[in-house]
Image: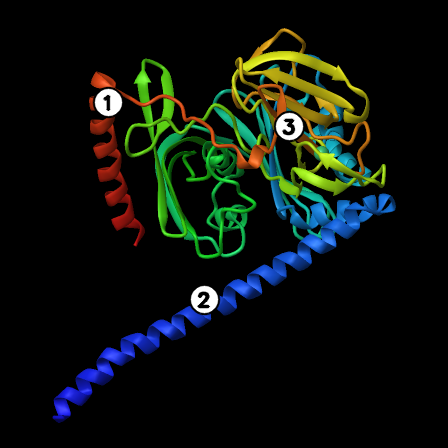
Amino acid sequence: MGKNKIYKKIRDYSYFIWLILLISVATITTNFYDSNKKNQTNFLKKSLSNTYLIKSIKKITSELKPRYIELDYVVKQGDTYENIINNIKISKKEKKLFLETISKKKKLKVLRLNQKISFKIDRKIKTKIIEFKIEIDNKNEIYFVRNKVESSFTSKTIEKNLQKVIAYKEAIITNSLYNSAINLGIKPQVIIDFARLYGFQVDFQRDIWKNDSFQIIYEEFRNNEGLLVDVGEIIYANLNLQNKDLKLYKFEYKKNKIDYFDENGKSFKKTLMKTPINGARLSSSFGKRKHPILGFTKMHTGTDFAAPKGTPVMASGDGKIIKARWCGGGGNCVKIKHNSIYETVYAHLSKFGRGIKKGKRVKQGQIIGYVGSTGLSTGPHLHYEVIENGRKINSQKLKLPSGRTLKGKERKEFEVNKIKIDVLKSKLISKFN
Ligand SMILES: [Zn+2]
């Protein structure tokens, strides 16, 4: 055998050796991931079966919360600064500081209808307001920033004169989608929209793995000083899950009718959502389980999502409300009839959404209520049920027909729109890198 031939053999084998190495690494990683997940599940199961551990459930959910939250408020009839600040979970001292700061500004004496107020809150150690903005008229707002040492705010009036900027962001998901996005400076509103769009196809608790990635193009509104004041709509997004792209394009298919479509012009919307709530964690799945309060084994006919009290719950599809009232163990509950086949139920709500009552029609994604712990419940969570032809089924295993597919003229226009967005994307990427 010539020297060259031997080298060639080694080269052939080296490919093989690498393959084996790769497989073993993958196996070790998967095992580690599985055992880690099992530990977490066991821990959760243990805590859930103990009625006295409501506290620990609260602790778990609080650990899942992001450090910073942003709250945007639009002033309604009869509002006062007191009731606005009382709706925020902060200490009495913080509330007092806010009211005192406001009272020093003459321009803020009177609250106007539809006036915008936004808060940025830091929940590390002691929850406190770190900045807030109050609109004074259509052009100006007062911006308050907390001073590092003392308990006070510095304020300045800024002109809004907003300019639309197209933003591009991309990232590899290392921890959670939410954290990766926040770290990039993406506003929570955009993340919520993003999650809502993908909520039809992606189970955010299970389908997102470490090293999956996302890209997003959306509108930002900046003032003269370059300060980010508001965000607009998502124009394009891609969620790459285990090397599979899930692209979506914004498209105005009729005047003032906007929807999101995949590469093939198929609407992203499905008849029902898998997860009718944002930022929640699946805490108990469909199937047999020991009831956390009653103690005996019972069929769990829905899916539970743990989320902080007050988290909005959405209608998982268009439909008509056939129940919105107290229903015993389920506490405050809502039932929606979507069509002749599907109905959905949402239980343990703290309160109902505005105008939600029997007989009312709702749109997919509309807020129908807020997470609570009413009825037989150990802590704030949403109990979600999907009923198919009168039978309760596992919402997380549901294979749902998708919405419309663009055809004819609409499809042609969509293709042009898609190319435009792709060109915009390449431009933004070249600037980004
Ligand atoms: Zn449940």
* Colour scheme: rainbow
Image coordinates for residue 331, horizontal then vertical, percent: 78, 24
Secondary structure of residue under mark 2: helix
Say how many tags the image has. 3
Q: CA distance from mark 1 to mark 3?
A: 36 Å
Q: Report the side of 68 relative to 290 (left or right).
A: left
Image coordinates for residue 48, horizontal then vertical, percent: 78, 46
Reading the image, the residue beneath label 1 is 411
Q: Quadrant of residue 43?
A: bottom right
- Kind of residue sitting beneath label 2: Ala
Reading the image, the residue beneath label 3 is 385
- Kind of residue sitting beneath label 3: Glu
Decide which of 190, 152 is in the foreground and name it.
190
State the residue at coordinates (40%, 75%). Answer: 21
Reading the image, the residue beneath label 2 is 26
- Kind of residue sitting beneath label 1: Arg
State the residue at coordinates (33%, 27%). Answer: 266
State the residue at coordinates (28%, 79%). Answer: 14
Q: Report the side of 191 relative to 52 (left or right).
A: left
The answer to whether residue 79 is above or below residue 54 is above
